Structure formats: structure tokens, C-alpha cells
Amino acid sequence: MSGISGIQGLEPLNRAGEVEHLIDAVKALIVPFVRAADEAAPSKATGQLALNEEGVARNVLVESLKPEELVKQLALSLPKAEGRGEEGLLQTIQDILQHSVNTWDQGFLDKLYASTNAVGVVTELLLAVLNTNLHVYQVSPALSVIEKHTANALANLFGFTGPRAGGISCPGGSGSNLSSIVIARNTLYPETKTAGNVCASGPFVLFTSAHGHYSVEKAAVTCGLGSTSVWTVPVDASGCMDPSELRALVVRAKAEGSTPLYVNATAGTTVLGSYDPFEAISAICREHNLWMHIDASWGGPAIFSAQHRHKLAGSHLANSLTVNPHKMMNVPVTCSFLLGPDMAVFHRANTLPAGYLFHAPTDDGEIWDLADLTLQCGRRGDSLKLALSWIYYGAAGFERQIDGGFATAAYMADILSERDDFVLVSANPPPCLQVCFYYAPCGKIADASEENTRRTREMVAKLVRRGFMIDYAPGESGSFFRVVVNCQTLRGTVDGLVKALEAVGREVVQ
């Protein structure tokens, strides 16, 4: 034996062969999982499950089980001695696929995200192979450059065009919103970075829309500000923050001895999809020295659309902005960015001395050790998910997809408005991709809110058995339906959902 393989004690490696073998084996499981959703799509237009050749209906969307039933079905066991090898691995993967919600299925209209796409799957594979940490440039040179470039390009779209504009990726929209509050506090009141939440002018107050995301309150708890530091601002009939109410609350907070710190405006609220009036909110923030943040986690990607970007007018006036491509743009979960006009501000707010990890910036002042800009140390390369999708589809491709999603939402609103048994809660067309409505036989909502809630909940449960998964939210007249279309939703799917709603509605309301 000669060469390196002949060195005593050095066994030859075949990790590449093992990876190749397992990828092929897993591919044989996941491709049929996606294909099943594709093949089930035509049947969605009927509003019920299709029968196979044996006359059996298969629900590709989900095999619905209660938690205790699923525990028995999975019978998960982690080996205490030798592992189960390839056979055990593949069987477990098959079980996971069988008992998971297939978000590739057209009937998944439940949350503010849906399936990824082919380029998304490839991206996740690449990130798994690299398995590196985007905390310092030395170990992630290519991905660090990609994150800075992608964040800068995205920031430019929102009007952050200065020489230090850009952003960072965070672990989801809640993480981005939390980071924005920390940056706001440490920037406007630098002493808090060392002394904590101590302010001579009184305790901090954060303002958010009554329809804003709960992550703002959770972030306040995490920052030690307490949930009572978050004041909700009333909304108008369209679900948009009322600037006059915001101004009154800011003035009141000051009069009561508190320190107004931060305003969270929303681009695409969770329930109605409303966009707040950013220019008017910005004027109040400038007048009272408040940090203005825009939570565009859901509705932000409309910036790619010439038809819909007007909804984000004034976004360039924000101090920071969250956007989640893993929602409307169908890149893999999670992919969230916190953007801003000046990354030097982010750096001053978050940097801490750690000479064993972070090293000096380059001569031009650029920060390449990206974790020095964030609350995280361990950082996955989530920005690559948007970058490769952008390379694959281009901005024009994103625009077509987003315009298509908005058009589908409007199509559904039109259909419901023409039916006698539905009453829209959303505007028509809806401001974003969710359509909200009540089931109302003969156009009449039940007098008792409890009855409307009962109808809605029971109908949602019955829809799952027909291959549709939608959600509901509380309203003044009880819970109403919230259907979230996505950029891949077909109009035939909308037709079928309305048929299914009418059918289960007749079952629930005698």
C-alpha cells in the first residue's frame, strides 16, 4: 500500500459517498411528497377530496390526528445504544412526511406563509452542506459578502439609499422586531447600554397599532420593559393606525412622566393586511424624537411591485424596517431581515468587546463580522435563501408572483361579494393577500357573536376533511374566517374553497 492511504492509523474517508447515497434515498421520499400536492391540485376546484382508483379519498394536505393519537402513531424512540442506521432513518423520515402538513398542497391557506419552491430546497441543501456560522467573516467569507450585498439591495428598494444603508438577517420577524427595539433604546438613550432601562425622564413607552403583531409586547418583556410599557394605538375602519390617536397618546405619556421611545408601524397587519400611514407617523416621531420602526414582515415584499409599492410610501423615513421573504416570497422559513439607513447605528448599538471573536473593521469602516451587528452569535446563512431566489427569478419574476397573489386575493373577494351567504370583513380588493369574511346565510350574520364563532370554528374543522386549511380571528361579531392566499394559489383552488365553504356551511347552520 502506498500514498496517504498507507499511513498507519489513517482510515480512508468516504463521506461523499455516504452523502450521495442518503440524498438519493431521501430524494425518493420527498419528491413524491411534493408531486402528490401537484397531482391533487386539479381536484381542489371541486371543493372536495378526489377518489383514487380504489374509490378511496386521500387527503394530501394532512392526516389530521389529535396529539395523543400522533404520539402513538409515531412511536418515536431515540436509541440508548446502537442507532437504527439507514433503515431507521428513512422510516422516520417517511413517518414525518406522512404526519406533517403538506404546505405544497393548494389547500394550505392558513398562515402568512406557504411552501417554498425548487430553488428554496436547493438553497437549504447548500446551507446544510456548508454548515457554517455567519458570525465572523473568516469562517463564512462568501456568505458574509452575499448577506451584505443582498441586504443592501433590499434596503435600497425601501428608500434606504445612503452609503451605509443595509441590513442584517435575524431568526424570524419577532427577532428582527426585538433587535429594532434594542437598537432604538441604545441609540436614543446610549446610557441604557450599560446602565439598563434607567431614564431620567421616566419609564420608556412603546407604541404599536391595536392590530400590530404580538412580538412587540413579547420583545418589551424580553428587554425588561414589561408588557405594560406597550401602548396600543386605535385604528380606523380600515385597520390602519390613527395618527391623531398616536399623537394624543405620545402627549399623554409625557404628561404622565413617561418617556416615549418607539413607534411600531405595520405594513400588512396579521389579520386584515392593512398598511399604516407611514408619512404621518414619521412626522409625529420626528416631532417627539421617537424611533420609527416599520414591521413589514408580511406586506413588505409589495415593494417589488410597481402596482402595489405605493402602499409603502414613506418607508424611507423609518429608522428600521423588518421584512420576511419567507412569507409572501415563498423562500424557505426562516428568512427575515432588519433593514436601516445606516449600519453604523446598528453597530454602535449592539457591539461589545470580544477580541477573541470580532476583529477590527476594514479601512473603509465596513463591518464584516456580522454578528457584531446583531443580538446573535450563532447565525445561519438565511440571507442566501433570498439571494439565490433573486438570482433565479429576478426582481421581475418576484413582481409577477406578487402581483399574481394580490390578484388572486381580489378574485376571491369578488366571488364572496357576489354570493348571498358571505359578508366581507376585508375591503374589496383586500389590502394584502388575506381575505376576511363571515359566513352569513342569506346575507345575515347571526345576532349573537357566540353563534358566529361556533359556525366559523366548526366550518374550519370540517374544511380540513375536504383538503382545505384556513384560519379565523376574533371580530366584533364573533370569529370570522381569514383565508391567506399565496403567490402559488390557483384561481381554481379559490373556486373550490368557496364551494366547500358553502357545503360545510349548510351542515353547520341547519
Image (cartoon, helix red, strand yellow):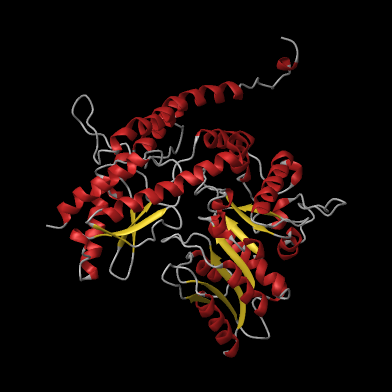
Q: Is residue 15 above or below residue 382?
A: above
The percent coordinates of residue 111 (x first, y second) are: 41, 52
Residue at position x 65%, y 52% in the image = 157
Residue at position x 55%, y 61% in the image: 295
Taking 232 as reference, is 384 above or below it? Answer: above
Query: In the depicted view, which residue is nearer to us: 262 or 438?
Result: 438
| Residue 371 or residue 445, whichever sits in front | 445
- Image quadrant where residue 318 sits: bottom right
At which x and y percent is residue 384? 62, 41
Q: Camera-side residue: 187 or 140?
A: 187
Give the quarter of the figure containing the N terminus.
top right
Residue 324 at least partly seen:
no
Tell which residue pokes out farthest to the top in this image: 1
Q: Quadrant of residue 256?
A: bottom right
Q: Quadrant of residue 322?
A: bottom right
Q: Is residue 304 above or below residue 510?
A: above
Q: How many marks?
A: 0
Measured as percent of width and height from the top left, residue 481 is found at: 31, 57
The residue at the point 58 percent across, 73 percent down is 224
Q: Which residue, as the protein is rendered here, is positioned at the far left?
A: 510
Is 199 on the left or on the right of 28, as rendered?
Answer: right
Tell me if 384 is positioned left or right of 366 in this view: left
Q: Residue at x 56, y 39 (%)?
A: 397
Whole-percent x, y for residue 453 in the image = 25, 64
Q: Is residue 205 toward the left or the right of residue 414 in the image? A: right
Residue reaching furthest right?
A: 363
Q: Nearer the viewer, residue 466 or 310?
A: 310
